[in-house]
Image: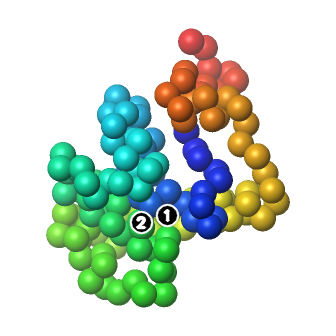
Amino acid sequence: RLRLRQRHGQALAAHPGIAPSFRAHEDGDDALAAAIRERRWRKLDHLSPRQRALCELAEKLSATPTQMTADDWQPLRDLGFDDQACLEVGHVVGLFNYFTRLADGFGLQVAPELLEAVGGGPALRRRDQKD
C-alpha cells in the first residue's frame, strides 16, 4: 500500500508504524487512511497521542528537516520512545522520502494493482502467498 508519487516528491505526511495509512487501512480505519493521504489528519479528533506525535514528526522531518530540533522528538520520548525507537522512526520516514524522490527522478509509474489496493481494493499479496 505504498503511494510512490507525492506532491513535490515528499513522502506521506505521516508515519505511525510506517505511514498510518498502512496500519489504519489494515485495521479497517479507512477514514484515518484517507485523512493521512489527503493531509487532513490534524482535523481528526480520534487520533491517539502516538499517532498524532508520529504524524507531526514525520511531516516536519519530511518538509523541513533542517529545522528539526530535540524538541520535535520530545513528544515521542514522552510516549516512551527511546533513542533506538526514534532512530527507527527517522529511518522509516527518511526511506519513504528517498524512495518517492528516486521514483520521481526516474519517472516511475505506480503499478495499477498498487493503485487499486491504495484505493481500497484487494490487499496486495506476495506472489508466493496463498489466499
Circle 1 sits on which residue? Answer: 93
Question: Which residue is at a point 20% across and 64% down the rendered structure image?
Answer: 80
Quarter of the figure that contains the N terminus: top right
Q: Quadrant of residue 79?
A: bottom left
**Label 2, residues with CA under 10 Å away: few <14, some 14-19, many ≥20:** many
Examine the rendering and report whether any part of residue 111 can be seen: yes
The relative height of residue 22 versus residue 124 in the rendered view (above or below) is: below
Examine the rendering and report whether any part of residue 95 can be seen: no
> What residue type is disc 2 on?
Ala
User: From the viewer's perspective, is 85 left or right of 78?
Assistant: right
Circle 2 sits on which residue? Answer: 58
The relative height of residue 50 versus residue 20 in the rendered view (above or below) is: below
> What residue type is disc 1 on?
Val
Quarter of the figure that contains the C terminus: top right
For mark 2, give the secondary structure: helix
Q: Where is residue 89 in the image (x, y as percent from the top left)?
A: 42, 63
Q: Where is residue 99 in the image (x, y as percent from the top left)?
A: 66, 59
The relative height of residue 55 versus residue 17 in the rendered view (above or below) is: below
Mark sitting earlier along the chain (2/1): 2
**Label 1, residues with CA under 10 Å away: few <14, some 14-19, many ≥20:** many
**In front here: 4 or 98?**
4
Q: Do the residues labelled 2 and 1 touch (CB within 8 Å)?
A: yes
